[in-house]
Image (cartoon, grey):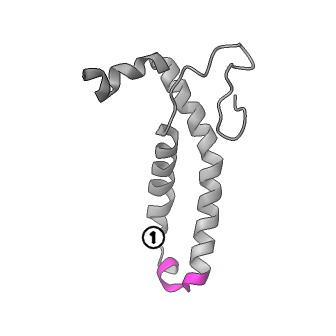
């Protein structure tokens, strides 16, 4: 489904369906950050170790796993986002209906 890390293949390799018509721009990145922040960062702040340990240990010990988790989740959330766009029938051609420029 992916051509590179985040570039979506123009066509599905299994069925040939055109995937380039679904506008998955910033939505997947937003949802990935939302999920990682709420499910992992917020509970992490409840542990006293985070507040008592030296910052030179906490920063790399927290940021490296969070960065890896974000990179692991991002393509999967993008695939799910495109699936939701497909299920709801949203296509790139519908974009003109939702912009402020179309009102002028």
Q: Secondary structure at mark 1?
A: loop
Instruction: Residue lying at the far right in this picture: please name it.
Output: 13
Q: Is residue 91 visible?
A: no
* Drawn side of residue 94 relative to residue 103, left or right: right
Q: Is residue 53 magenta?
A: yes
Q: Is residue 48 magenta?
A: no
Q: Percent from the top left, x then y, of residue 57? A: 61, 80
Q: Quadrant of the C terminus?
A: top left
Q: Percent from the top left, x then y, of residue 33? A: 49, 51
- Which secondary structure type mostly characterizes the magenta part of the structure? helix
Q: Residue at x 44, y 62 (%)?
A: 42
Q: Tell me which segment is drawn in magenta.
A: 50-56
Q: Is residue 3 visible?
A: yes
Q: Quadrant of residue 1?
A: top right
Q: Which residue is mark 1?
A: 45
Instruction: Residue lying at the far front in this picture: please name it.
Output: 104
Q: Residue at x 45, y 50 (%)?
A: 34
Q: Percent from the top left, x then y, of residue 7? A: 65, 34
* Drawn side of residue 59 relative to residue 97, left or right: right
How many callouts does the rendering have? 1
Q: Quadrant of residue 56?
A: bottom right
Q: Looking at the image, is 48 positioned above or below residue 35?
A: below
């Amino acid at each position: 489904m992916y051509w590179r890390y985040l570039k979506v293949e123009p066509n599905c390799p299994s069925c040939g369906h055109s995937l380039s018509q679904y506008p998955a721009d910033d939505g997947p990145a937003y949802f990935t950050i939302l999920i990682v922040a709420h499910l992992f960062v917020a509970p992490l702040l409840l542990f006293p170790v985070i507040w008592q340990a030296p910052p030179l240990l906490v920063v790399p010990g927290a940021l490296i796993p969070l960065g890896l988790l974000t990179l692991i989740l991002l393509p999967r959330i993008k695939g799910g986002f495109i699936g939701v766009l497909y299920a709801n029938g949203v296509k790139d051609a519908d974009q003109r209906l939702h912009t402020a420029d179309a009102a002028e």
